[in-house]
Amino acid sequence: MTTPATPSADSAPLPPPLFDTAVVAGVGLIGGSVALGLRQRFLARRVIGYDANPDVLREAEALGVVDEVRAMPGEWLRGADLVVLAAPMRALTPLARDLAPYLNPAALVTDVGSVKAGIAAEMEALGVRNFVPGHPMAGSERGGVTHARAALLENAVWVLTPTDHTPLTALSRARMLVEHLGAAPVVMPPEAHDALVATVSHLPYLASLALTHMVARDERLSLLAAGGFRDLTRVASGDPRMSRDMVVENKVALREALARFRRQLERLEADLDEPEELLAAATEGKRTRDSLPVVRRSLLPPKHDLVVAVPDKPNQIGAVTQALGAAGVNIKDIEVLAIREDGGAMRLGLETLEDVAHASQILREAGFEVRGRS
Amino acid sequence: MTTPATPSADSAPLPPPLFDTAVVAGVGLIGGSVALGLRQRFLARRVIGYDANPDVLREAEALGVVDEVRAMPGEWLRGADLVVLAAPMRALTPLARDLAPYLNPAALVTDVGSVKAGIAAEMEALGVRNFVPGHPMAGSERGGVTHARAALLENAVWVLTPTDHTPLTALSRARMLVEHLGAAPVVMPPEAHDALVATVSHLPYLASLALTHMVARDERLSLLAAGGFRDLTRVASGDPRMSRDMVVENKVALREALARFRRQLERLEADLDEPEELLAAATEGKRTRDSLPVVRRSLLPPKHDLVVAVPDKPNQIGAVTQALGAAGVNIKDIEVLAIREDGGAMRLGLETLEDVAHASQILREAGFEVRGRS
């Protein structure tokens, strides 16, 4: 028997946890994953889940996502040295207002919202000194604490957006938290973050929605809508309320991105009368698109693509994945590139150059034509 | 031994071919596939390949794509009762001008260009009476006669766009040709076709190009560019010259589509101040997107989707496809839905409801959570 205070001689003592008492406020997919990461990686002595929904708390406790649960804000919050606000976008500000009166001024406070300028200003107005706005860029098709898992955050880009008033010690503690959860911190001002996500996420959502509306209630259009159109409208298939909240919260940056998008479209439209200019634009666009990282976690081990030509025979997707599975090659991502599904090409995302070499050999021996790029 | 004129008693005589002498002018991916379909399905007594490039002709002959080849227009064309113009968009009109003086007035003439009003008007100006403009909606990642195959056209939507002057007998022969090649004819006026492809293909290309240009030369943007952004910009990765030619040829209809797209974007932008309106628009957009057919060949056997939740363990794509492959289920399409590649969900496109039931059972037994829709 050992006690925490006196580890036995044959087991190395655990390092002291980064935090004593962590509170995760809002125990959904992201909050639950943060709580699991804190527990599984021994980053806090205890993790308290706070949620207004008692069903969520029961489930979080039953799944072992948190050590303790609380349904009402109160004096118990003063014991927390880490508070993570993990409510959905529209509930973040009310949540912050509910908890602010009880927060320990020394506690590190952070959030996980996907838009940053508003909450940063709100927390300053509330006088929460050690607040570091954050945005872990992770998600899943399935929400809720049931699907929470520590691995969701591993290797994810996690943007931290300190303001001019954020204490450097708080930023440094937040960065350590992110790194210890296995994610990759990227630091930038809130406004820069919001402008970036407006461009790469919120504007594409609105464009996708606009395109989708153009084919609504027209049978012939949806008949002719091919692979390219499906690709462009996939994000319109996400949760309408979450998507709506995201774009409304970021409407200032989004309007600016929309204005730039319109200028790009106008330039391309003008180039319809200048075919050489349009060819240059198309060529430059292809170069940019082809150089985008295949998966988001590009800070970390580089990912590699392998393109496999598949003949017009049945079950070629199965043949490719089975050959690689049998050889122990782990397919990290897969994308069907062909316009028609009975022949064409597919792209495999692999982890290492060794995997690429191994997979290329296996697939060539199985009679497939392959091309790699990293 | 039998001769073509006297089939033996124990083999049923082949039906007479639809055409005596077919000419495929431009022997690339589509032209080569048409030629192969004509030969393999016994639709013409002989198939002549015409191309300005002698290397292409040599390859077409060596691959058995055509029976004979010709490198120059001439009197030999008068013997053709079917002429398929299959050059790239920008070469179609010059090709038509080169061949027109030699065409037999009774020959059925069609083309495979992806924009229709221009070529329809051009052929009328040239006095080609039995011309039926066509657009087989098929393609492949890989071009050229080397990759031609009759199956490319099977079950493809093939739009035929007669004008007010097109003889009904010519339309009827063209429709029979398309059906005998295994494709699904859809008939509409050239202007309607051009407006539809402007909306579902050319406008999405320009939007994708505009988005791509917005992240050019910005490391941070490409770092944060996630799956959704990749989806929206995939079509910008196509061949720049072919894409450029397509949108320039269709610029009238494309400008109209751009104007409607701008109005949709403006309405969504205005709705940023009307969150309830925006929620309704997002909900309606999701409904429309979710009802799009998963593959284009929706005229034909319906396709069915199965969504599989995959846990955060290595090689789950392989596990799913191997389980189905071992059970003989043919995966027709595959799409990774998850935002992160180490967990989430994938969508499988299956051919029959039996396949869906069979695959669901196998995957559930293997411990996966599945949802189907058709």
Image: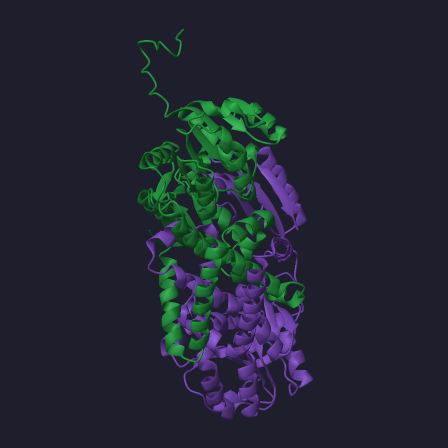
Chain colours: A purple, B green
User: Considering depth in this image, is B312 or B199 the residue closer to the camera?
Assistant: B199
Report x, y in % for residue B61. 56, 24
Residue depicted at x 62% and y 52%: A351
Q: Is residue B202 left or right of residue B185?
A: right
How many labels, in total? Answer: 0
Quarter of the image holding residue B5?
A: top left
Residue depicted at x 67% and y 79%: A172
Q: Is residue A125 left or right of residue B220?
A: left
| Quarter the N terminus of chain B occupies | top left
Compared to residue A323, the image places residue A130 above or below, namely: below
Compared to residue B300, the image places residue A65 above or below, namely: below
User: Considering depth in this image, is B239 or B280 the residue closer to the camera?
Assistant: B239
Q: Is residue A68 visible?
A: no
Q: Is residue A154 left or right of residue B167?
A: right
User: Considering depth in this image, is A307 or B82 the residue closer to the camera?
Assistant: B82
Report x, y in % for residue B236. 56, 55
Report x, y in % for residue B228. 51, 61
Report x, y in % for residue A228. 48, 53
Residue depicted at x 50% and y 31%: B101
Quarter of the image holding residue A53?
A: bottom left
